[in-house]
Amino acid sequence: MTGVDLRALIRIVPDFPEPGILFRDITPLLGDAAGLHAVLDALESDAAHRRPQAIAGVESRGFIFAAPLADRLGLPLVPVRKPGKLPAERMSVEYSLEYGSGRLDIHQDALARGTRAYIVDDLLATGGTAHAAAKLVELIGGVVCGLGFVIELSALHGRSRLATYDTFSLLTY
């Protein structure tokens, strides 16, 4: 990597979005060109050796990293969206996360059967969101070749929920 102290670019915000949560804010990282470049380099390195045929980005912060990663690798970008955002036929999965629940959607025709997809998001916490995204890729016939995260909160054991997938995290707290 480039020698950028990425941990120094992650702001810790206590009690957000709920009391007891220590939120890892990536905004300072995004505001630092060298830091953002270093993150994209690391994700690109991990993704490239997994030979993806598409990059799937999880709404919304996952899009920030997935889009330039797809561009760097010359691959299509598949958005995994929150409810009500996709206009065509879609598959949906409900999931739980560290402070609530949610649902993710993917267009049914987003990937051809057997397409290898690398899933990108900013944070791995309990693994609920990532697991839902992986299930969506599989439901439409894709193959999850890996998942990449900027930050992993190891105390929440999300990696164990993703044990059947190759998982990469740049920073672990």
Image (tube, rainbow, N blue to C red):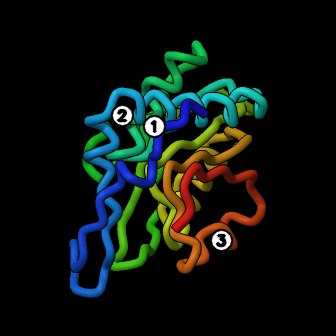
User: Earlier along the polypeptide chain: callout 1 or callout 3?
Assistant: 1
Q: Using the rendered image of the protein, determine whether residue 58 is visible from the camera's viewpoint.
A: yes
Reading the image, the residue beneath label 3 is 161
Between the residue at mark 1 and the residue at mark 3, the CA separation in whole angstroms equals 24 Å
The residue lying at 54 percent from left, 62 percent from top is 152
Determine the image quadrant of residue 99: bottom left
Between the residue at mark 3 and the residue at mark 2, the CA separation in whole angstroms equals 30 Å
Q: Circles 2 and 1: CB distance less than 8 Å?
A: yes
Reading the image, the residue beneath label 1 is 107
Q: Position of residue 96 (x, y in %)?
A: 44, 75
Q: Position of residue 23 (x, y in %)?
A: 31, 68
Q: Position of residue 18 (x, y in %)?
A: 22, 80
Q: Circles 1 and 3: CB distance less than 8 Å?
A: no
Q: Secondary structure at mark 1?
A: strand
Residue depth check, mark 3 versus mark 2: number of the one nearer the observer:
3
Residue depth check, mark 1 versus mark 3: number of the one nearer the observer:
3
| Residue 88, disc | 2
Q: Residues within 10 Å of mark 2 (few under 14, many from 20)?
A: few
The residue lying at 25 percent from left, 48 percent from top is 84
Q: Residues within 10 Å of mark 1 (few under 14, many from 20)?
A: many
Q: Secondary structure at mark 3?
A: helix
